[in-house]
Image: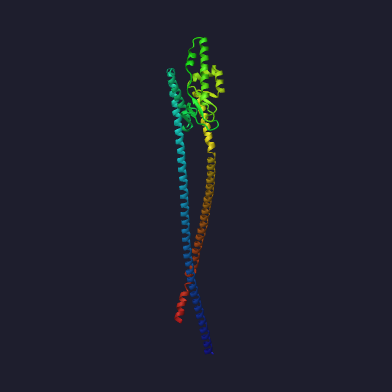
Amino acid sequence: MDVTILDNTGLVLGIGLGLLALLIAAVFAMTHRLRRENHEQMLRITQMAETLGQRQSEISGALQQSQVTMNDRLDGLGKRLGDSLHQQSERTGQSLKTLYERLAVIDSAQKNLTDLSQQMVGLQDILSNKQARGAFGEIQLNDLVTATLPPSAYEFQVTLNNGKRADCLLKLPNPPGSIVIDAKFPLESYQALRDAADDAAKVAAGRRFAQDVKTHVVAISDKYIVPGETAESALMFLPSEAVYAELHANFLNVVEESYRRRVWIVSPTTLMATLNTVRAILKDSRMREQAHVIQAEVQKMMEDVGRLDKRVGNLQSHFDQATKDIRDIRISTDKVTKRGEKIEDLQLSDESPAEDLPPATAPNLRVLGRDD
């Protein structure tokens, strides 16, 4: 009875030990499999991290390339703007230079007029001789014309088709046509009128003065108004403001006769105003002649402005696209950074179970090994 009990007890003990051994072996196999899976998962995570690192490097390279491209475009734009500003500065400098030259011409003309005014003190001596008087009138006429009009608008000592020589010919377009200016004028009768001692002498000198002026007006009308060659009028230049004032103040009949003969009597002051009017007419004529050229240039300029506006729009589109690309790249880099942080957190959580295994597991395995 006791032996049977002992045998049954030994059999149960043996079965229990066998089951325990099987359980330990199963635990050992499971632990080994978990470590192997853990190791394979770590390898996959490492490979993913390397792949992400490579992609991040590629993204960084693309970002750097985009930055370089943008810098190149900005440099090109800066260069074009600099060239445009330089050209504009050169044009402005040229315009200022032209303005200074014109101001210098005006200053020169004013200086000539000032010098001429200072020399009027000796006018009586200069005008006492007919030849000197004619030369004085021609010189003053020359100074006024050359100071006001361009060289292509006048010509001195011109011989007309009728054989008469004009002191000056203003070249105006038709209508009205070229206008002759005569610088010769009677002075002896004016001096006699001014020096008259009594009323009788003054009346006689006045009649002579009026007759001399009328004779000169008729001569200018007959000589220098040539149909088909000149305008229907001519100018009689009086280089003395005093003679001009006397004529218009006390001899209106002579002035009216000059109107009928289409001979306009002018003084230095009124001739300057007339020449300025002539210059305006010439300028207007040239503008009419060049109107089609100006219109064509304006059309080309408008086309250039249109192309410039289109190119500026294209440049704005490039800037907008570059800004969008940079914003997308920043979004991608932020996502990559966040995924990298998640991967680091995942590595820490996967390593924790392997490090925190129960310390009793290893001795049990060694005991099982000795029993085996």
> Foreground residue, 200 or 239?
200
Closer to the camera in the image, 80 or 302: 302
Residue 233 location, quadrant: top right
Q: Is residue 154 above or below residue 315?
A: above
> Which residue is painted at 47% across and 47% down in the image?
80
The spot of residue 37 in percent (x, y) is: 50, 72
For the residue pair 188 and 337, the one nearer the viewer reads as 188
Picture mark count: 0
The residue most toward the front is: 162
Q: Nearer the viewer, residue 146 or 117?
A: 146
Task: Name which residue lies at 47% across and 61% down.
Answer: 58
Q: How is the image coloured?
A: rainbow
Task: Give residue 82's position: percent from left, percent from top.
Answer: 46, 45
Quadrant, the N terminus: bottom right
Residue 76, compared with residue 332, is above or below; it is above
Measured as percent of width and height from the top left, residue 197 is found at 49, 10
Image coordinates for residue 155, horizontal then vertical, percent: 47, 30
